[in-house]
Amino acid sequence: MIEVVNLTKLYGRFVALDSISFTAKEAEIVGFLGPNGAGKTTAMRILTGYMPPTSGAARIAGLDVVDDSLAVRQRVGYLPETVPLYRDMTVTGYLNFVAQLRGVKKRKQRIAATLEQVGMADRARSLIRSLSKGMRQRVGLAQALIHEPDVLILDEPTIGLDPHQVQDVRALIRDLGRSQTVLLSTHILSEAEQLCDRVIILDRGHVVAEDTPVGLQDRLQRQGRLFVRVERRSAQNDVMRVIKGVQGVRKVEPQGDGYLITTAQNQDVRPALSAAIVGQGFGLLEMRAWATTLEEIFLELTPRAEQRH
């Protein structure tokens, strides 16, 4: 449904996107992750026809975003990070205006269905300026859905929402992802883990990783990691000394009420580790695998600016 090939965008001498390529299939939710300035919003603006690329190609439903711009826009719903609302209009009046621009037929029925879909049916006649930030975000989502697009491109869709509204919008996105292609950017990495079938991580205009969240965890976890908890009467320095002495243990550090242990790749140290801990009389309370989170992967692949030089 979305196909990007060697897409490049230059702003003067600044390279915002440097020959990136990726795809998004029909009925797939794809997360677009990256630090500020990575190129996420630039890519989204190109895909929605807001600006042309410098080189490369982007196609939606087989249509080129430059050569077939109007046809592409008919198939895409876009929620930018700053929601484009007319604050002096009512919710219904604004959606009717958007629906007219989109050429939507049976506008009244479609507006009612969309407001129901985003949980705003009871505020249909409210002035947009009277709405909370979270409610305005929902109206922005409604304008992206009003013409029933095949592809949804959402830039930070849950920003500014309270926890209950976040859960509602995430549930809506999951439901939409059953029949539509959804490309969303988010800074909430747990959100990407919960929502996305696949994630694409951008850094400085490059795609640095692309896989399912589980696939990234498996592929990028180069070393094994264990979490161990012992009885509190044991001195921390003594416990760490014994753990470090086990063959195959690369690193040990305090983690909450226990210890996070990094081991050599493909080496099971659990039998020797448990024997060493119990043998010293420390009292082993817990030992379990420690999974790599998407946040840790993100931090590993996108170092801070001061670490890049």
Image: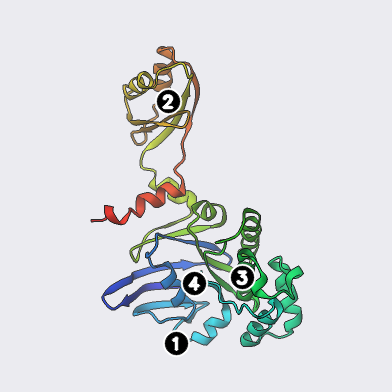
Q: Decide: marks 4, 1 in contact (CB < 8 A)?
A: no
132 over 147 or under it: above or below: above
Disc 4/disc 3 C-alpha distance (Å): 20 Å
Q: Residue 270 carries which label?
A: 2
Position of residue 190 in the picture relative to residue 273 (left or right): right
The x, y position of residue 291, in whole percent, is 46, 40
Please give the name of the residue rendered at 54% of the width and 54% of the height, measured from the top-left corner. Answer: 191
Disc 1/disc 2 C-alpha distance (Å): 59 Å
User: Mark 2 or mark 1, which is nearer the start of the sequence?
Assistant: 1
Q: Which mark is residue 67?
A: 1
Q: Mark 3 points at which residue?
A: 141
Please give the name of the residue rendered at 49% of the width and 85% of the height, measured from the top-left corner. Answer: 69
The x, y position of residue 87, in whole percent, is 62, 77
Of badges 1 and 3, the one in the foreground is 3
Position of residue 149 in the picture relative to residue 42 (left or right): right
Residue 263 sits in quarter: top left
Secondary structure under the numbered disc 3 in the rendered image: helix
Disc 2/disc 4 C-alpha distance (Å): 45 Å
